Every structure is written in C-alpha cells, then in structure tokens.
Amino acid sequence: MAPYKYRGALNIGFQLSITIGILVANVLNYFFAKIKGGWGWRLSLGGAMVPALIITIGSLVLPDTPNSMIERGDRDGAKTQLKKIRGVEDVDEEFNDLVAASEASMQVEHPWRNLLQRKYRPQLTMAVLIPFFQQFTGINVIMFYAPVLFNSIGFKDDASLMSAVITGVVNVVATCVSIYGVDKWGRRALFLEGGVQMLICQVAVAVSIAAKFGTDGNPGDLPK
C-alpha cells in the first residue's frame, strides 16, 4: 500500500518498532528495578500488555489492501480503496497493473514446487540462511539477557541495566540509519556493510575473550 519510493523505509518500520520496544523495555526495567520491595519486575512483565493491546485494537481497524481485495474478486472495492490510499481519482494505471499481476499469479501452476527449481535455489537459499545466521550469531541472547550478561562480567546492577539501555539506543540509531539509506543506497549495500561491521566487532570480542579467559575459562578478577 506504500508509495514505491518509500517502500524500503516503511518495510524497516517493522524493525524500528521492535528496536524501540526493546529500548523502552530496557529504560522501564532500569527504573522499575529501583522500586523498593523488589516488586518492580511485575510491572516489567505486565507492561508487555500495552503493545499487545495496541496491535490487537489496530488490527480491528486496519483496512484490507487493494491486492487482497482483487485476489478475492472484489475489484470495485479494491479500486475504491486504492483511490482512498493514493488520495487521487485517477488510479486506473496502477489498478490495471494490480489486476494484471493478480491474473498472472493465478496462472502459475504448483508455485511451491517451483521454488525448488534450480533457477530459484540461490534466492531460496539466501531467504533461509540470512535469518538463520542472524539468529545464530547470538544477538538475541545479548538483547534479551543484556542486564544478566553485563552483570556476570563485573557490572553492578545499575550499570548492567544502563548498559542494556545503551545497547538499545545503538540498536535504534542503527535502524534509523537503515531507514534513511535503504531507498538511496539499496538493501544489498546495507547488507554487505552490516555484515562487515558485525564481522569486525565479533572478531574483536572473540580476541578479547580469548586473551582474558584463555583455554580454562577462568579470567580471575575482571577489571572494571
């Protein structure tokens, strides 16, 4: 439904929502941890209800896309919806493109089986391996358990929570850079740049851990 020139940026809006959510959670955890009596963790868990409610209520008022309406045979409704989205009356060219694309897709036989054909294997392989290795790097462990992780390497409670907040801020800023640049530089350039950046940082972390922990896993007293 997005205008063509903004689709890349709006697509990353999903990731931006996640990173902002992580940052907000980290900030709230930092302040909830200061509540006397130790019951702040209940607010941390209960607060997850807020975004869940926003998504649930939002889904009730979210309109159908013209594509979806065309697929279900409601072409008149799809055209009306397209006019509403674009804010103009003359949408015939785009509407005809959508109809043509829908008709072409309906003529494809065995679409799932076609994915296994040799000519599609590079795209299929990348579609599976990119998210797999993204998780396999361990970034989810760092984001989910950042306070525990920082606490275990010598940070005090407040410092470990603040470190998680800083990690969240970096995450949001990096996502904003992607939103700004994706439609200018392209996804491929950002993907390659991000891969090199990750590689350098993870090699640095591995070298640091190897130098301090050695082969026995006992670092002794860790300096601040």
Image (tube, helix red, strand yellow):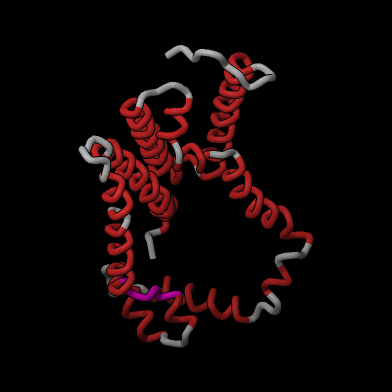
Q: Give the range drawn in magenta.
A: 62-67
Residue 1 location, quadrant:
bottom left
Q: In the image, residue 205 lies at what x, y percent?
A: 56, 23
Q: Magenta span: helix, strand or loop, mainly?
A: loop
Q: In the image, residue 111 lies at what x, y percent?
A: 67, 73
Q: In which quarter of the image is the C terminus?
A: top left
**For the image shown, how many numbered marks are present on the structure?**
0
- Magenta span contains residue 223: no
Task: Kindly give the residue lying farthest to the right in the view shown.
Answer: 118
Position of residue 212 in the picture relative to residue 40 (left or right): right
- Magenta span contains residue 65: yes
Residue under the image location 75 percent in, 65 percent down: 116
Residue under the image location 52 percent in, 39 percent down: 139
Tell which of 222 and 103 is nearer to you.
222
Tell which of 181 and 129 is nearer to you.
129
Position of residue 28 in the picture relative to residue 198 (left or right): left
Q: In the image, residue 21 lies at what x, y percent?
A: 34, 48
Indicate whether 74 appears above or below 158: below
Tell which of 116 and 1 is nearer to you.
116
Residue under the image location 37 percent in, 29 percent down: 160
Residue 88 location, quadrant:
bottom left
Position of residue 221 in the picture relative to residue 124 (left or right): left
Residue under the image location 49 percent in, 37 percent down: 142
Tell which of 136 and 223 is nearer to you.
223
Indicate whether 140 appears above or below 62: above
Residue 150 location, quadrant:
top left
Position of residue 156 in the picture relative to residue 67 (left or right): left
